[in-house]
Image (spheres, rainbow, N blue to C red):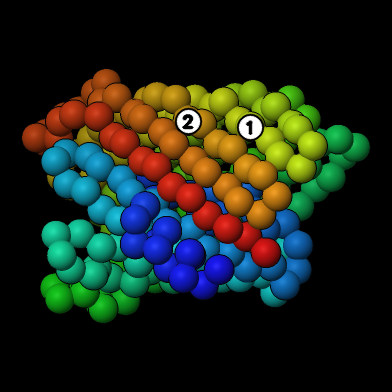
Amino acid sequence: MTRLLFALMLFVSSGADAHQPEMDMAPRWGGGYGFQTRVEHFDDVTTTWVEGVYTWDKSVRATFKLPYRDGELGDLILGLPLKKYVNDGPKTANWSITPSVQLPTGDRGEWDTGVSFSYSSETPSFYQLYDLYTWGDRTGLDINAGFAFPGKGSGTFALWDVSLLTSDQGDRVQTGPVFVYFKKNMMFRAEYKHLVYERDSDWEGGFFNIGIGFVY
């Protein structure tokens, strides 16, 4: 299993600013942990992310994100998501604040900090996530909403994503479909976002992201 996880992490993971492992959805129990890897492509740049999470309690967890691009490892990002869960019959929801720090571990590394405020809820048929974040000179809002299709020990989500970002490099709005599938301890996510608006930048093309993860 260790070799399989290592191979998957080298092979295959929306940006470092929003979203947290595992796929924003797991684990939801104390003493849980997981790893995921993602490959994303935007503006002619491909980045592979290796990411992980550990929960002391379902409301207190630690995460890491490590990028790899152009043959080099980038700066390690550490996060501390703090969650407040609310259960109401078949509906579960949580509010979250996530302070993060970037360590200068890359060849041209630098320190940076950020914070994210998010809300997500899920019923047997509908899922939604709203994530407002700031990181360095960037401020963004990411929205995922759509339908859930539960199965026996598995589930499928058909979502729509809207991402808004403003920064010193320009502003952009991207939107597109997201597909999430889980079965037991495995999770898979694929998404495509089209660039529908940009200002004061030379960004172009669509955003692709595909990832796989395991949670225990």
Circle 1 SS class: strand
Q: Which residue is mark 1?
A: 156
Q: Residue at x 16, y 39 (%)?
A: 43
Residue 198 lies, in percent from the top left, at 20, 28
Front-lying residue, 2 or 78: 2
Residue furthest to the top: 196
**Which quadrant of the rendered structure holds the N terminus?**
bottom right
Residue 113 visible to the viewer = no
Q: Quadrant of residue 150?
A: top right
Circle 2 SS class: strand
**Local crowd at mark 2 within 10 Å, few (<14), some, or many (≥20)?**
many
Mark drawn on residue 178: 2
Residue 85 lies, in percent from the top left, at 76, 52
**Which quadrant of the rendered structure holds the C terminus?**
bottom right
Residue 72 lies, in percent from the top left, at 18, 68
Residue furthest to the right: 89
Marks 2/1: CA–CA distance: 11 Å
Look at label 1 and name its amino acid.
Thr
